[in-house]
Amino acid sequence: MKIVFIGSVEFSLHALRRLVELNAEVVGVCTLKKSKFNTDHCDLSHFCAQSGIPSTYVDDINSIENLQWISNKSPDIIFCFGWSRFLKKEILALAPLGVVGFHPSALPKNRGRHPIIWALVLGLRETASTFFFMDEGADSGPILSQQAICIDSEDDARSLYNKIINTALTQMKEFLPQLSERNFKQIPQSQDIANIWRRRGIADGKIDWRMSSQSIHNLVKGLAKPYVGAHFLLDGSEIKVWKTAVIADKYDNIEPGKVLEKLAHAIIVKCGQGSIVLLHTEPKLKIEPGSYL
């Protein structure tokens, strides 16, 4: 089974490496040299060179030149794992088995952008690793494989990302022979329970101390590395917040944003509800109790 692979993020590299480990016939790879918006961007060409796989840099995956490049590889199937651009019907129809995409959510729930970030920001307790056959919609095609993933209270973007990678690689080992033998199932998605998450903007990562301490904590976890980090402004300068802890407090007459206590390597800040410990900021804060953020 000849496979053309499309991808440009960290997960893409893990998935491509797994295909090679499974002795899959990867006949070509489309990737991006750089990205303006994916902080987990990964150029796959270096791995391809090491593995003897033809690769090409693309900008518009739907261009005539790129369609011809893929077509010349005569793929039986296309894998598109970690690609933030829509594929048009021309590319979706190139391979006899179609195009398999990947989305780290429990489709049909939570289609759309930034599924790892939103799952953590919203405090979800479960997500999923989902492979599906792509159509012209947004993550709306029939499901090939789906595995639930528990989100623990201590999970942040990095640990959840790793969980999703490990789960997805196990799924790939299971469904790859099914695809090769044409012995797979396609499960239609129910539109009745579908929703689409929007693209996150810079303002979505800004901490408002009027938020509850739990909401701020969730925001910090959701934007932890490999993503851009939650932030707030102090005297016009941006402060990144990478790690926090929630604590209860007895203060109901103190304004949000007031620094309550300074510890050896952290500070405690009053929130709209509860208080939060800023454990890791960039740069490190030099501020005294009684000050305001």
Image: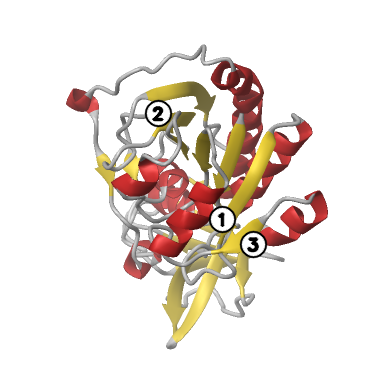
Image coordinates for residue 145, horizontal then vertical, percent: 49, 22
**Quadrant of residue 176 in the image?**
top right
Is residue 138 visible from the viewing direction of this image? yes
- Compared to residue 70, the image places residue 21 above or below, namely above
Residue type, mark 3 in image:
Asp
Residue type, mark 2 in image:
Ala
Classify mark 1: helix, strand or loop: strand
Quote the CA–CA distance across marks 3 and 2. 27 Å
**Which residue position holds label 2?**
106
Dot 2 surroundings within 10 Å: few (below 14), some, or many (20 or more)? Answer: some
**Which residue position holds label 3?**
43
Seen from the viewer's position, the closer of residues 132 and 58 is: 58
Comes first in the chain, label 3 or label 1: 1
| Marks 2 & 1, CB-CB < 8 Å contact | no
- Compared to residue 166, the image places residue 67 above or below, namely below
Classify mark 3: helix, strand or loop: loop
Is residue 156 visible from the viewing direction of this image? no
Quote the CA–CA distance across marks 2 and 1. 27 Å
Seen from the viewer's position, the closer of residues 291 and 195 is: 195
**Which residue position holds label 1?**
30
**Quadrant of residue 1 in the image?**
top right
Q: Seen in the image, is 75 located left or right of residue 170?
A: left
- Compared to residue 163, the image places residue 80 above or below, namely below
